Image (cartoon, grey):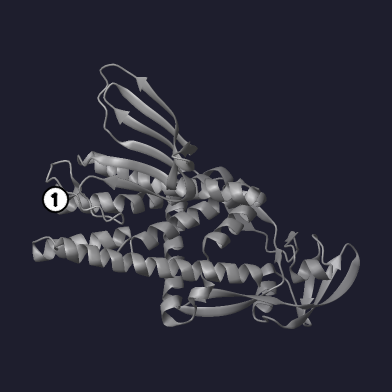
Amino acid sequence: MTTLFSFIILLGVLVTIHELGHFLAARSVGVHVEKFSIGMPPRIFAVTSLNDGWLLKIFFYKPKDGSLKWQPIFEKLIRKNNRIGSKTEYVIALLPLGGYVKMAGMLDESMDATFKNDDSEFMSKPLWAKIWILSAGVLMNTLLAFFIFSSIAYFQGTPEYSEDPIISELQEDMPAKNIGMLSGDQIIKINDQEISSWKDMTKVIHSNPEKEIKIVVKRDAQIKNFNIKTTSALVPRNGGVDTLGLIGISPHFYYNDLTFTESLLIGKNRTVSSFSLILSSLGMLFSGSASVSDLGGPIMIAQLAGQTAEAGLIPFFTFMALLSVNLALLNILPIPGLDGGHIFLHLIEGIIRRPLNLKTRMVIQQIGMAFLLVFMFTVIFSDISRLFN
C-alpha cells in the first residue's frame, strides 16, 4: 500500500504543478480555460464555476436504460449571489496518470478544432503569449525541483562524509551485507593494498566490477578476512558509460548548516546538475550506449516511489524533484503532442508568417501521438519484463 499511495501522491503533485502552470499562464493573458483536470477520465468529482455560484457533481455507476453507466450520482448548486463565474470545470478523474488543461480555441490532443475567433481563444493570442502558456508547465516543474532541492539543503544542511574507511551503513541484498560485514568495521586492506581513507577504498572497489576481492577489516580488537564478489552499476561519464564495482556500503555523513542564500545556490546547482544528468542519459540513448529497455516507466516509478517513501521524507522528496526535472525536460522536447512540439509548430508559423492549415496540424498531432503511444508501450513492456525477470 505504501507503493500505491506514494505513487499517487508523487504523480498527483507533479501533474498538478505542471497543469497549474498552463492554467495560470492562460488566465494571465486572457485565454478562457474550459477544463482543468487532474487525472485521466472518467471523472469522479467536478466543480464548475458559474455566475452566482458553483455546480458540484460526483460521478459513479448508476442504472440507466437497463444498464449501469458512469454518470452523476450527486449534483448540488452552491449559490453565492453576485459572483462572476469563469465557466471553468475543475475535475478530479479516476486514473492518477496525467492531467490536462483544455483551453478555448486550441487544437490539442483531443483534436477539438472548434474556433469562434474570439479574443479569449488561444489561437487569437500573439506568438509570445502562446509560447508563455505552452512553456509554463515546464517552468513550474523546474521551479518545483528548485524549491525542493533548496528546502532540503536548508533544513538538512550540506552533507560531508568522514574520510575514515569505517562502514556506517550497509545496503540490503548487497555483497557486504550478505557476506557478514557490519556497521563499524574498519577496512584496512583490499587485495593486500593498504587502505588509509574512504577515497582509497572506493577507488579500488570501483575498479573491480564483478570480481572477487579480498578485504581485511578491523572489528573491535579483532582482524577479520572476507572474500567478496563485487556487483556493478553503469554510470554516465564523459558522454559514455563506465562500469563501477560496488559492495553496498556507505560512510558516516555529517551535515553543516547553511544560510538561506547558500541553500538557494545549492538548490540551483542541484537542479542544473539534474538536467545535465538527464541530457547525458539521452545522449547515451541516441549514441547506442544505452537502450530503450534501460528506461523506467510507471511500474519502475511506482517501485522507486515506494522505496524512497519507506526510506524517509528526504529521499522521497529528492526523488520527486528528480522526476520533476525529468518531466520538465521531456515535455520541452520538440515532439508533436508534447509542450515542446506545440511550441515548435507555433515557431514555424511565426517564421512563415501564416498559420499552418488545420489538416496539416491534425496530421502532425496524430503522428506525434502515435509516436508517444508506441514509446509508452515499449517502456511499459520493458517495465513488465524487468518485473518478471
Q: Is residue 321 left or right of residue 31?
A: right
**Residue 377 point in image, percent of width and height:** 47, 68
Q: Residue furthest right?
A: 222
At 31% from the left and 67% from the top, the residue drawn is 368
Q: Which one is in front, 191 or 352?
A: 352
**Residue 332 point in image, percent of width and height:** 33, 61
**Residue 315 point in image, percent of width and height:** 59, 52
At 51% from the left and 63% from the top, the residue drawn is 297
Query: Of the residues shown, which amino acid type is indicated by label 1?
Result: Pro
At 36% from the left and 70% from the top, the residue drawn is 371
377 over 312 or under it: above or below: below
Mark 1: few, some, or many residues within 10 Å (few <14, many ≥20)? few
Residue indicated by mark 1: 126
Q: Quadrant of residue 85?
A: top left
**Residue 280 point in image, percent of width and height:** 44, 72
Q: Which one is in front, 256 or 101?
A: 101
Q: Quadrant of residue 92?
A: top left
Quarter placement of the C terminus:
bottom right
Q: Is residue 264 visible?
A: no
Q: Residue furthest left?
A: 353
Q: Quadrant of residue 333?
A: bottom left
The tally of labels here is 1
Q: Is residue 20 visible?
A: yes
116 over 379 or under it: above or below: above
162 over 145 or under it: above or below: below
